[in-house]
Every structure is written in C-alpha cells, then in structure tokens.
Amino acid sequence: MRSSWKLLAFALGLIFVLPAGARAQDEEQPPAGKETKPFSPQDLSGIWAIRPIRGVPWYNYALAGDEVPMTPWAEEKFKENKPSFGPHPQEDSNDLAYACFPAGMPRVYAAVQAAMQIVQVQGRVLMFFGRNVRQIYTDGRPHPKDLRPLWMGHSIGQWEGDTFVIDTVAINDKNWLDRMGHPHSDALHLVERFHRVAADTLNLDMTIDDPKAFTKTWTAQRTFRQRPPASRMGEAICEDIFINDAFGLKPTLPSMK
Amino acid sequence: MTPWAEEKYKAAKPAFGPNKKAPKDSNDPVYGCFPPGVPRIYLHPKPVEIIQLPSEVIMMFEYDRLVRHIYTDGRPHDEFLDPPLWMGDSIGKWDGDTLVVDVIGFNDKTWLDRVGHPHSGELHVVERIRRPDHNTLVDDITIEDPKAYTKPWTGQSTFQLRPGTEISWEGVCENEKMLDRQ
C-alpha cells in the first residue's frame, strides 16, 4: 500500500478541496466588518470553509469529541475499520476514500480543510464538496419509497424561518461516518440545520439518528466561514494521488515553492 | 501533429477507433478513472447539466461526476496552476449571444479524444458556445497547442436539450476491482 502518499495527503488535506484563493495565513484572521455587512439569511450561496478551532484536533477526523454511543453492531465494525486518521491511525488503512469512492454524508464535514460550495436554484440546493455533489430537493417532494442506497443519500430541504433544514436518508453504508472509522448503517437518518448568522458565518447543527449503529440520537456542530468571492473550488483528483501506478502516470503533487 | 505528438500517438492504445484494443489492454487514462479533460469530456455520451449563476457557469457531467466551473465574473486565469489541472482552468465571457470560454492550465496526462490524440501542457482550448434554438447548443472548439500541433484546428460538439432528465450522481467509475489494487 502506498502509505507514504496517504501521509502526504493527510498533510496536504487533498481529499477535500481547498479553494485556490485560501492560503494558510488568512485562515485565522477574523473577518473585518462582519457585524455591519448586510446579508440575507435565506441566501446560503458561496464557498464556505469549516472554521477549525484551536486545540480541537478531532475536528479533522470526527464529528464529535466525546465517544459516540455505539451499538454492539457498530462496535464490531469500528474494531474492523482501519482509519488513517484519528487517535489510532494505521498504515494499512482500509478506508474507502483511498480507493477514490465518494465520501458520503456526513463524513464530508469531518475534515478541517473541508470546503463546500452552495448553489441555490429553483427547486434545488446543490452542495459541492469537490466532486462529491449532493442535490437537496426543495420543491416539496417527499423521499421516494423503496429508495436504493446512494453514495450521498437522498436529501430534501425546507426553510423553517431562517434555518434551512435538510433531511437525508438512503445513504449507502459503504463509507464511514467520519474519518476515524466510526461506521453507520444504511438506516442513517441525517438532519442538518444550517443557519447563516452573519454575512460570513454559517452554522451547522446536525443530528445523527441511526438506531442500528447508535444507541441514541446525538448531535454535532460545525461553523463555516465564507471564502472571498474570487475563490475557486479547485481540483482534487483522488485517483491522481492513490491509483496512479496502474497506467504509468506519476503522481501529481504541487511543487514545493 | 508535431513529431513529439506523433510519437505519443503511436504509444497510445485506445479502446476506440480504427486501432482499437480491448479495454483491458488499453492504456487510456480514463480506464484508471482519471478525468478525461477538456474537450474530451464532451465525447462521453452522458448528459451534462448547465447552471448559470451571476459569477460562473457550472457544467455538471454525469460522466464520472465531473464538475467544470467557468468563471464569468471577469477574473483572470488562476495564477496558482501548480500542479496543472486535469480539466483546465476555465474563464468565460459573453460576446453577444455566444459564451466564449478560455481554458488553460492543463496537465499533459489526458487524451484529446478517445482514439489517443495527445496534447501537451501548453494546450489552450477556446470554446464558443451558442444556442441557435431552444433545444440545441453548439460548441465550436479551437485546439491550440504548438508543442503537439503544427497549427490550431477546430471541432464542434452539438447538444440537445432533454427536458425532465436528471443527472445521476451514482456514476462512480471506481468499482470493487479497484480495491484489489490496495
């Protein structure tokens, strides 16, 4: 296994997209004038990056800091999973992300360099996490019955006042809940509540409801900062880093300038 | 083609065209689930959804879930094109009723088409996209790559509107076989 590439990817955070305009020196600055800039709470569009919190390393691999209440089924799976992130990273990881499958939900939030672009159009909200795209139907439709599991699940959304509530089911169980190997089942029912509290600040409260994997419902939070309008989503091609040897293509890494 | 490009073309083992091989004997990068690049993405017969926003045009391809962002807010090309991109860096502006898209910043790892014509990192693609009637898009594509081609040349892609079609996000190139390589 190409463990050296995994460590490099960990360092570069290349599984998730870092907008090209974002450089390390402006991650920590509090944006100026945020109290006075007008905004519409029902406008979630833009590129948003997770605001990491100093001294909270688990932001980069888990959704919650405390140990989550797993069922015996989930404990078994958790033991089998070999993550490359978290308190016990393993060299020979069996994390599907290294086979370049989609990350699934809510795993996309378990990385401090996660950035997402939200686009609102008629009847849908689109969220781009690099090439992991999810479509949230806002036209009032319910979840279809007999839905086969999908990589990013089936999402419907509606506004409750100034909070955008997304209800997602039918997430396939091939991927983990987070990057440290907590599992979830395809019975996972994920509810996300997005609330734009300032021009540049978007808060997320999510509820994890998966009776097969967890003994009770639990919640997790994230805060996002809006990237400047000139940011780009960038390109992060997983195959380029991890599945590059089969075709004689050398890995593509940024030069160390 | 230039001599450089002729050499590369001889080494290509495509799964399409007059010299085609079986996919398992092909060295076409798309069989490694690498992105096909631009304009080759248009040759893969799956639908694309186009969304127009004030600052960009987004093309969402069902083929391998690829997304192109064509920035139309007047920004220049990205100066941080390191490493170079599989799908290039696209900026666009309107010339009357035609969207003119300028794409640079490519790596040289993709084929221009499915028969194996190569390109270099100097590839510069210009697309002129117009909608002559409600159901049709025409994209006139100019390929300019002095390292690979002795002069610029053009091609055309035509698209038909499919009302009611939804892009599927389940089209993942990777399958269980990829896991065997781990």
Image: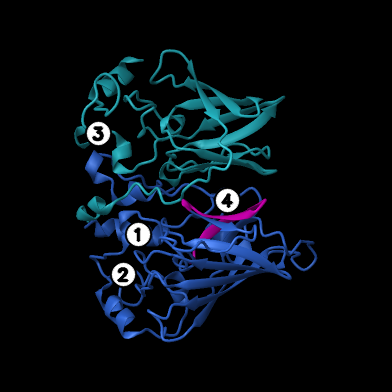
Q: Which mark is residue A83?
A: 2
Residue located at (44% from left, 65% from top): A170
What residue would you read off at disc 4? A21
Q: Measured along the vertical axis of the image, is residue A146 above or below residue A71?
A: above
Q: Which of marks 2 and 4 is nearer the N terminus?
A: 4
Residues marked 3 and 1 touching at CB (< 8 Å): no
Given the image, what chain letter belongs to the residue carrying mark 2? A
Residue A226 place in picture, x, y as percent: 64, 60
Q: Measured along the vertical axis of the image, is residue A212 above or below residue B73?
A: below
Residue B92 place in picture, x, y as percent: 62, 33
Q: Which mark is residue B27?
A: 3
Given the image, what chain letter belongs to the residue carrying mark 3? B
Q: In the picture, which chain is cyan? A: B
Q: Which of B47 and A116 is in front in this view?
A: B47
Callout 2: few (<14), some (14-19), or many (20+) C-alpha neighbours within 10 Å? many
Determine whether the residue tagged by mark 1 lies in a helix, strand or loop: helix
Determine whether the residue tagged by mark 2 lies in a helix, strand or loop: loop
